Image: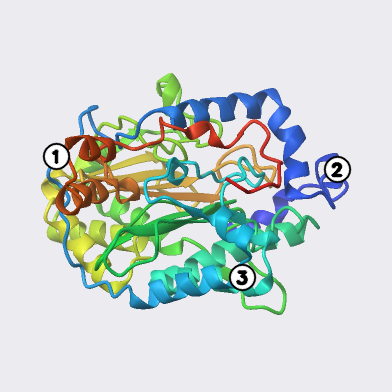
Amino acid sequence: MSSKHFRDYLLALDSPRLVNARGLDPFEYAKPIIASDKAKALIDTWQTLYQQPFKGLTADGHVEPGLFQLGDEGLDTRTVVATAQALLASVTDGERQALQYPIDAPQWRDWYNPEFPMNANGVRLDYLSGTAREAVMAVLRASLSEEGYLKTERCRIANLFLGELYDLRNIMNEWSYHFLLFGTPSTTEPWGWSLYGHHLALNCFMIGGQMIISPTFMGAEPTHIDRGAQRAFSLFQNEESFGLQLMRSLSPTLRAKATTYHQMKDPAMPDDRWHFADERQLGAAYRDNRIIPYEGVCATQFSSGQQEQLLKIVDAFIEYLPQGPREVRLRQVEAMLERTYFSWIGGHGDEDPFYYRVHSPLIMVEFDHHSGVWLNNTTPQKFHIHTVVRTPNGNDYGKDLLRQHYQKEHRHGSAHIARHAHDHSHDHPQDHDHSHPHGHDHSH
């Protein structure tokens, strides 16, 4: 079904779910949701995962060493640093204290993607002044490529559009996001930022001329945004069409090999292969340490044209990176095509919803059509899409680069190195009370 048919699945405007939420502060809105058995079980699962020491996504439970190196990728961070410094100057002392964290703080890993606040980390953009919000956007604009910033802006506008459709702009708008700054903005030392909320999460780590932006989560429901007089747009068209084109180009034999499951919720799936919040996706929020075996077809079985199409898919997912880091990442992925796999779930007809994954030791991207959350379709449709980018083998959040940096630049004894060789998420992840995320005191 076309992404433009989403209006056939709108909730009734007088439904209790909508009426009871109108006018509520986001944290007040979250209270009854978080108290429900289903959400409580989900949050408990996610927080249990968050408590685990960071290891990283792996294919077999073992982190493969030596995949990532410190180096200059041509990133000029001077503008980014200047915008971050301007942001710090534009907020109040309390906001500055709330949004700044140590570079290795566990809160890197505490992002989420539902519309209801699940924690009180950092600052909420909807509580900041307009000047401070624009200063945050300046940091994003300086950190991302032009098309990458546009995509994140459109994800936020899609959230606003959903709020407008249901008169729930108090819950869903373009500022319904947390922002955190890690470390001290510097052209030489490691630092970074994260932004997360409904259908959008970005984790950006920078060190010198090098950058990692992952994990990322971008989604929309609906994916076609038509706000009347404003210009309409659709999200994730390249990710959707490029994946479908590759699947359709395969021979029947390879297509069958790429298809891990024929149905989106297939009876053949093991219990942990489908999740009510993530559906088919394996690398979404809190899944930092998941073991995800390679599936499907190895790219060595593709023609040169099909390999180029596979790289086009990856490029569409990482287009948020500035030119230098983006080109370096693509070259790295291309150099490891012999260990890159393409897998598929669902059909490949014009109307069929589907899931696919491109997965190598260096990158994992996932595309998934979802069932309704704010629309009432009970099966996956093309107007609800989630996309994920991960850097496996310990380099999500730039953690492997940070580990190497400490070993190279801060050799103050083995105890210090050992302390930073692992994530601190198991040290003090209870600093914020996640069971009651409606507290507005952001002080640490």
Count of marks, rendered view: 3
Q: Give 441 or 280, whichever is nearer the viewer.
A: 441
Separation (CA) of disc 1 from disc 3: 41 Å
- Residue at horizontal 26%, vertical 50%? 402
Q: Is residue 2 visible?
A: no
Label for residue 65? 1
- Residue 114: x and y in percent read 60, 44
Rendered image quadrant of residue 434: top right
- Amino acid at the residue labelled 1: Pro
Per the image, label 1 sits on a secondary structure element best described as loop
Separation (CA) of disc 2 from disc 3: 31 Å
- Of mark 2 and mark 3, the one earlier in the sequence is 2
Q: Residues within 10 Å of mark 2 (few under 14, many from 20)?
A: few
Q: Give 36 or 435, whichever is nearer the viewer.
A: 435
- Amino acid at the residue labelled 3: Ala
The residue singled out by tag 3 in the image is 132
- Of mark 1 and mark 3, the one earlier in the sequence is 1
Q: Is residue 270 left or right of residue 160?
A: left
- Residue at horizontal 32%, vertical 61%? 206
Label for residue 20? 2
- Residue 21: x and y in percent read 81, 46
Per the image, label 2 sits on a secondary structure element best described as loop
Q: Residues within 10 Å of mark 1 (few under 14, many from 20)?
A: few
- Classify 429 as above or below 191: above
- Residue 400: x and y in percent read 24, 46
